[in-house]
Amino acid sequence: MKNEINPANLKLNSSAKKQIHQCLNVVTEIFGQDLLGVYLYGSSIVGGLEKYSDLDLFVVSNRATTREEKATLATALLKISSIYMKSNELPIEMTIVEQSEINPWHYPPRFDFQYGEWLRKQFEYENIEPWPAKEMPDLALLITQILLASTTLAGAKPDQLLCKVPYKDFMTALKDALPHLMADLESDVRNVLLTFARIWSTVATDAIRSKPSAADWVISHLPEKYHPVMKRAKAICKGEEKEHWDDIQELIKPCADFMVREINNKITEIMLSNNLDRSIKIA
């Protein structure tokens, strides 16, 4: 497969370029001619990499992986991906989809394989399919981001393989994500708060923002008593403060609840309107 962009030409540090090159080698070896496209998206494209950013890779194939191939992927990615702040390398988030599961588009879509650092322990214990189901509403959000702002690393351009996600399905996916995020609030405070901020700013403005930018938007719309929570989340994200919450612990859940109410109210308003012929953009 011909690469559209050599990783060496990306505006990233040498470690990140090396990691991307390694990931490309792995998926190329596994899929061969069945590899249809590989895309870099997320913080490295929009907003810039922050202290806790991942290298986000989206892979489209012409077939599903076998169990043996999933094991090979897991073993390779455990070596390529880095635990946050443990080395110069970055964490890898790789999502693999079979084209027939997303084109023609249907909701909820299904994925084939995903690696992320939150799954590291399960992969280390050789649980190569640690997800409870293959349905992945979040694909509606990922595909929208990739079509709006991504770099093609290999294969066809994204609009040749991916369908534009209907606005209604995009909003449904955001709503469906809320309970899972709230369940992780206690164990992943910063990330969950910043994700709620991104969702709220998106449903209110139809624009996708980086986490720091979304935090700024939310701070201007939150009651003042919750400002310290989002200011802390943004500062940690940018590496300006260490992860610490004890001094404002009692404000975290109420702040999250407030954002979720605002998100649900706005999505309900959108769904009840007759104006669903809208598009998402990058802020």
Image (spheres, rainbow, N blue to C red):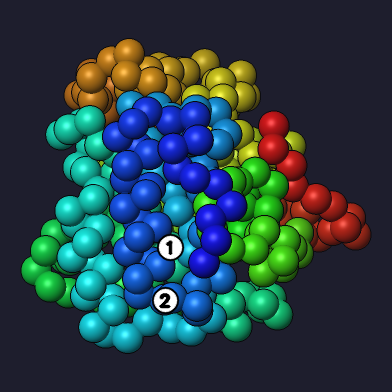
Tell me residue 139's x, y (percent): 55, 63
Q: Residue visible at 28% across and 76% down?
A: 70
- Of all residues, the one furthest to the front in this rendering is 2
Tell me residue 142's x, y (percent): 56, 56
- In which quadrant will I find the C terminus? top right
Q: Residue visible at 37% across and 28% down?
A: 13
Q: Quadrant of residue 247?
A: top left
Crowd rating for badge 2 (residues with CA inside 10 Å; few <14, some 14–19, many 20+): some
Residue ID for mark 2: 31
**Above-or-below relation of 71 to 198:** below
Q: Quadrant of residue 45?
A: top right
Under circle 1, the secondary element is strand
Crowd rating for badge 1 (residues with CA inside 10 Å; few <14, some 14–19, many 20+): some
Q: How many marks?
A: 2
The numbered mark, 2 or 1, whose residue comes first in the sequence reads 2
Tell me residue 129's x, y (percent): 27, 76
Q: Quadrant of residue 204?
A: top right
Q: Residue visible at 38% across and 47% down?
A: 20
Asked if residue 117 can be seen in this view, the reply is: yes
Q: Residue visible at 33% across and 27% down?
A: 51
Tell me residue 76's x, y (percent): 22, 61
Residue ID for mark 1: 95
**Above-or-below relation of 54 to 126:** above
Front position among marks 2 and 1: 2
Under circle 2, the secondary element is helix
Residue type at tag 1: Thr
**Above-or-below relation of 167 to 101:** above
Residue type at tag 2: Phe
